[in-house]
Each structure stands twice: as structure tokens, then as C-alpha cells.
């Protein structure tokens, strides 16, 4: 993979690549640099190298290594599957990929059992097939790729923000406007590394569009459409406008009267250009929202 530097000069190369190749994590990029798999004008550089105009950056992706992760026979709610992609309706409480504290029971463990060796290797040994993710306690649609060609095609669409991602959420408080847009760059919180925050100086640009579906006495049922896809984006943006997602104890009140296990947030619609057919495809979760979500809508006082 070769990238020519045309903007954002004088930035550390690991951050620059992270900003321009969203399918590669910052830690994975640093690992590539340490192993001389990232070159500038054909020469290896260190992580603190600052890019200059007209630099030619070469990224050498090593052959994918068989993950040291166990395949587990975990039932999957498969919405669609073909030779390139698989769309999963992820349940609440399931982590998407292995990480410290969650090496079993993840979506990756389940995919490895179901897909065998047919998963892309671009995102490293811990995330085979994973193009994007949703939070542990967010439910809904996730796409995984079965080969690197499909992975690169979807990663490019993520990069240019052309993938359709619509969520349903129940938020605290009554939103007055019928629709709106939240713009605010998102960065890691400087004091609490488990949280994200609005930071228009350090953060990456983020845009969320919302539309009110129904108003209740103390809550609002909304549809949120992502224009970008930053970590915790909807949760951070809704907090930013004074309406944190119901049940989100990280960005909202510590206590929830409805005893939810995490936030009331569901990824309902996922659409993109299919990597092989080149036609737009769109998937909707069935049912549109899971049982816990619809039960909550019936409990909220009008």
C-alpha cells in the first residue's frame, strides 16, 4: 500500500497513517514501524518521524498470522452471508473482538468457528474479519469480511464516510427540535482513558445527524445517523447536547430507573456498496429493535 502525502504536514507518521488509513489501529501501525514495514521514500523511519509534503509512504502488511484465539461454537444471528461478507445482529453484552479481559465469548471467537479460515487478516491477529465495531452493550448490525479484497473495499468506504449507519436510541430528556446535527471532534479523555470527549483541538472530526421519532415525558426516542464513525460517537455527541443515552452510566447519570445493562442504543441499518457486485446493499435488523428496547419503549411514561 502506497500513500502520497498531500495534506496535514508536520504530524507524527503513526498519527498521520492512523488518520488516513482508518482500518489500521495506532498500535498496529507502531508495530509495523518497529518491524520496518513502513517506509518513507523507501527508507524505514521511527514513530516520531514527522511527515513532509510529497513524502511517499509505503505500508507493507505482513502475511496474516493464524490467530491464537480459540474458535467457539457461539450461536450467531446471521442477517446475511455470502463469499465476501457476513452481517451479524450482535446481542447486548457481546464484545466484538478479543482484548485484555475479554479473550473468549467475543464475536471474533464465534466468527472463527462459523467461518473457519475464511476471514480477512488485514486488521491483525486479534481482529480477523473485523472492519468496524460497536460497543459491548450496543446491539445491532456488524459486518465482517471473509477476504482481504472485501475488507479493503469496505475500509475505503468507511474512510470516505459513504457507509450508511443508522441507530435507534432512547435518550434522557425531551429534545425540542425535530432533527439536528451534532458536530464536535472526538478524542480520548485526558484524565480518564476509558472515556472519549469533545476536543476540537486534539480530536478527529465527527458528525452525527439525529431525528426525533417520539417524545415521552422525560425521554426521547431518536434515530441517529453517523456521518463519521468515532469511538463512542453517538454517546459522546448526545451527551454534548444535553441528552445522554438512557442507561449510559459512562456519559450519563450513574443510576438508571429501568435497570438496563448498558445504554439503549441499537445499530438498526447498515448499507454499503457490495465489494463484488458493486451494487448498493442495505440491511435492517429484524426485528428493527431487540426485545429489551421495545419493552422499554412501552414502559416509558408518555
Image (cartoon, helix red, strand yellow):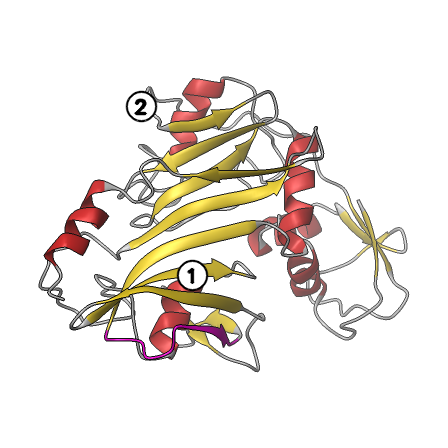
Q: Position of residue 246 (x, y in %)?
A: 23, 64
Residue farthest bottom in this picture? 201
Q: Which residue is mark 1?
A: 224
Instruction: Say if the magenta span includes residue 32.
Output: no
Q: Which quadrant: the N terminus?
A: top right
Closest to the observer, 48 or 229 = 229
Q: Position of residue 47 (x, y in %)?
A: 68, 61
- Badge 1 crowding class, 10 Å Cα cut-off, few under 14, some 14 to 19, many 20 or more, is many
Instruction: Say if the magenta span includes residue 182.
Output: yes
Q: Is residue 213 left or right of residue 182?
A: left
Residue at screen point 87% across, 62% down: 55
* Magenta-tinted stretch: 173-184
Closest to the observer, 301 or 271 = 301
Q: Position of residue 139 (x, y in %)?
A: 33, 45
Q: Position of residue 138 (x, y in %)?
A: 33, 50
Residue 75 image label = 2
Amino acid at each position: 500500500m502506497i500513500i502520497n502525502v498531500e495534506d496535514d504536514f508536520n504530524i507524527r507518521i503513526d498519527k498521520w497513517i492512523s488518520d488516513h488509513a482508518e482500518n489500521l489501529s495506532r498500535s498496529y501501525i507502531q508495530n509495523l514501524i518497529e518491524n520496518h514495514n513502513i517506509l518513507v521514500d523507501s527508507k524505514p523511519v521511527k514513530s516520531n518521524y514527522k511527515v513532509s509534503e510529497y513524502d511517499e509512504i509505503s505500508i507493507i502488511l505482513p502475511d496474516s498470522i493464524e490467530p491464537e484465539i480459540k474458535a467457539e461454537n457461539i450461536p450467531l444471528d446471521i442477517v446475511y452471508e455470502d463469499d465476501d461478507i457476513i452481517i451479524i445482529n450482535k446481542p447486548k453484552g457481546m464484545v466484538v473482538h478479543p482484548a485484555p479481559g475479554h479473550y473468549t465469548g467475543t464475536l471474533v471467537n464465534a466468527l472463527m468457528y462459523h467461518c473457519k479460515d475464511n476471514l480477512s487478516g488485514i486488521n491483525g491477529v486479534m481482529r480477523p474479519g473485523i472492519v468496524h465495531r460497536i460497543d459491548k452493550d450496543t446491539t445491532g448490525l456488524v459486518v465482517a469480511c471473509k477476504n482481504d479484497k472485501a475488507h479493503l473495499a469496505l475500509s475505503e468506504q468507511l474512510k470516505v464516510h459513504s457507509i450508511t449507519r443508522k441507530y435507534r436510541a432512547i435518550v434522557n430528556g425531551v429534545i425540542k427540535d425535530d432533527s439536528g446535527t451534532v458536530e464536535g471532534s472526538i478524542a480520548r479523555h485526558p484524565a480518564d482513558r476509558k472515556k472519549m470527549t469533545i476536543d476540537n483541538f486534539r480530536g478527529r472530526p465527527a458528525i452525527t445527524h439525529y431525528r426525533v421519532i417520539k417524545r415521552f415525558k422525560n425521554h426521547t426516542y431518536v434515530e441517529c445517523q453517523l456521518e463519521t464513525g468515532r469511538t463512542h460517537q453517538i454517546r459522546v455527541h448526545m451527551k454534548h447536547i444535553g441528552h445522554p443515552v438512557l442507561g449510559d452510566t459512562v456519559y450519563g447519570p450513574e443510576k438508571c430507573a429501568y435497570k438496563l445493562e448498558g445504554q439503549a442504543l441499537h445499530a438498526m441499518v447498515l448499507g454499503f456498496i457490495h465489494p463484488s457486485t458493486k451494487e448498493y446493499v442495505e440491511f435492517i435488523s429484524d426485528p428493527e429493535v431487540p426485545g429489551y428496547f421495545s419493552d422499554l419503549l412501552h414502559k416509558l411514561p408518555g
